[in-house]
Structures are given as structure tokens and as C-alpha cells.
Image: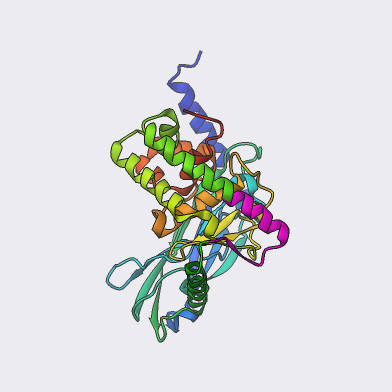
Amino acid sequence: MLSATILPLLTLSLLSSVYADRALSITLSGSTEVRDVDNFAVVTTVTNTGSETVELYNTPASVLNNFPTDTFTVTNEDGDEVPFIGAYVKWGFEIAKDFITLAPGESHEVTHQLGDAYNFTMQANYTITPRSTFYAVPSDRDSSPVTIVASMPEANHTTNLSGSLVSSVVTKRSLKHAQFLQKRLLGKRISFNGCTPDQQAAINKAASNAAEITKNTVAYLSRFPNTQRYRMWFGTYSSANRNIVFDHFKKILSSDVTSYQYDCTCDKSIYAEVYRDNFGVVYLCQAFWPAPALGTNSKAGTLIHEASHFNANGGTTDTDGTYGHEKCAQLAIDNPGLAIMNADSHEYYAENTPSLT
């Protein structure tokens, strides 16, 4: 009989051999001189350098798509990182519809407009490095996604940016946000953009449910701080971490999701997205509409998830690759400091499905 020590090693060895032929590389290209931030673009090329075909999840934070997510590390010539001002996205492996399939030697190329996602404040040389983690569909399609870290033989790219630092895309977003805030001053009530009557009804119900769930969550966390429910989603208990989470939920409650603006013009295969500086404006996307009203990955939970992203409510993030119950529960074990700032972790604590005490 194999010992308990040998079995895990044997399993790891078998898994390594199964996925040993899955390999990717990334290269980055673009102009070395760019005038005006609207023209600041780079092209990523992901190549299958392994010996078998790979089917990749088109995750929002990867270079496989042109979403304005935090896909790169961008530094100026002083070594300072350029602030990210792009989209925070709720997504999940369970709703994945878009896949990138690459045969051995095949490549996938995407152009990324950096001015849509990063705040360039000076004319300077900028070095861009792409995120290198990808997730492949497992052979049996029922197991967890397979993580592949791509090699980057020529991934860094340096460009000198001159001219205008004002992004037309960011300006348009900011103008829309300013209009929302101006209307909100006249009265805190829900508003819509591009939503059908049926969509408006669904949003009204979701916002009402989210407000009630948040209220109950604040009351519960106030009375019962150190619980199985807390530890499941935020890890080992500490009063300092609990206070951070509690403050987030209190701010979400006082911000009043029933007075946000909900935009239904998003056609991406995600649940929703927000821009963290643009408080109160939530873009609802394809996966939101078939989601259940309550329960795991619900409409109400999605609104709580998105509300937690706003700087005014705590500025949570979307930890790369941490989508769904299993991944978030593991994050709580591995890194409570990340869990208390992870939007999905907040959503799952609030949804509390299945119920924990």
C-alpha cells in the first residue's frame, strides 16, 4: 500500500505529466514614440509553444481581450507605477462563453488602448509588462481550470509618450459620472440608462434585495464578528481585519444602492463592471440578467460586489483568478489580507449561501 506521503507526490507527478505539454509565451509590440494618450496602444501576442492544443478561458483580466482591466504593469522612467483607472469586473468560470483555442504554434493577437485604463500624468518613457497568468479548460471539462504561467521572452516594451495626456474615453466616462452626480443632488433615487422596462423592474428588485441583505449583514457582523461565516470568506479572524470588512459594508449600506445609476448598454459576457472613481454608476452586462434574484452569484449579490469596488465604499479589487466559492474560500485560507479586499469574498459573505453562522 502506498503511504499517505507518497500518494500526494505521485498525484502531483501525474498531474505535472498530464499538463507538461501546455505552454504559452507572450510578446509585446508597439510604437516606441507616441503622441497623445489616445494613440497609446500596445499589441500582445500569445503563442501556444506547447505540443498540444489549449483552450483558454477569456478571463477579463487577461491579455486575451481588450477590456480596460488591470492587464499590465505600467511604470514611468522613475520606476513609479502608473495608477489603474479602468474597469473592475464581476465574472466567473461558471458563466464562461468565450474561449480562445490555440493549436501548437498558433497565436492570438490583441490591441490594447492603455489610455482607457491607466492614468498618465506626465510626458515620459513608460515601460509596459503584461500579466502572464492564463487559465486553460481541463481535458475532462469538469475539473478546476488549469493555470498556465506564460514565458515572456520579449514581453517588456518601452514607449515615449508626448502630447496630450487627456483620454477622450476617460473624459466621456467622467462627464457621464458628473451628470449622474448632478442629478443625484436633486434627489437620491434610482436611475437607468438604456434599460428596457423589464430590465428596470429586475434592477429595482435586485437593488431592494441588495439593500436589505446589506442591512442584515451589517447587523450580523456587528453582533457576531468571529464566526464560521467570517472565517470561510475572510480567513483567520483578527479584529483589525474584521473592522475593515465591517467598514466596507457600513459604507455600502449608507451609499444606498437603490439610488445608483444602472446602465444596460454593456454587451460583454460578464455580470457587471464599474469604474472605481465613478461612484454610483454600474454597468450591467449579459450574465446579470439570467442570474437568480437571490443566492450564490445572484443579482442582489452582484450589486453588492460592484458597490464594494467604489473608492467611497472601500475600494475592493478582483483578485486575479479568484472567481467562485472554491477559489474565494481558498484565498481566505492562503491570504486573509487579500480576502478582506476581494469583492467576490464580500458578495459571498453577504449572500451566505449555503447558510453559515
Q: Nearer the viewer, residue 344 or 61?
A: 344
- Is residue 70 rendered to the left or right of residue 108? left
Q: Nearer the viewer, residue 208 or 89?
A: 208
- Is residue 333 rendered to the left or right of residue 293? left
- Is residue 63 rendered to the left or right of residue 163? right
The image shows residue 343 at horizontal and vertical percentages of 47, 49
Single out the residue that lies furthest toward the left. Answer: 78
Q: Is residue 201 magenta?
A: yes
Q: Is residue 283 above or below residue 251?
A: below
Residue 63 in sight in this render: no
Q: Residue at x 72, y 57 (%)?
A: 198
Q: Residue at x 45, y 32 (%)?
A: 229
Q: Nearer the viewer, residue 337 or 64?
A: 337
Range shown magenta: 189-207
Residue 119 in sight in this render: yes
Occupied quadrant, residue 81: bottom left
Q: Is residue 206 magenta?
A: yes
Single out the residue that lies furthest toward the front. Answer: 187
Count the marks: how many?
A: 0
The image shows residue 242 at horizontal and vertical percentages of 34, 39
Q: Residue at x 43, y 28 (%)?
A: 228
Q: Nearer the viewer, residue 134 or 350?
A: 350
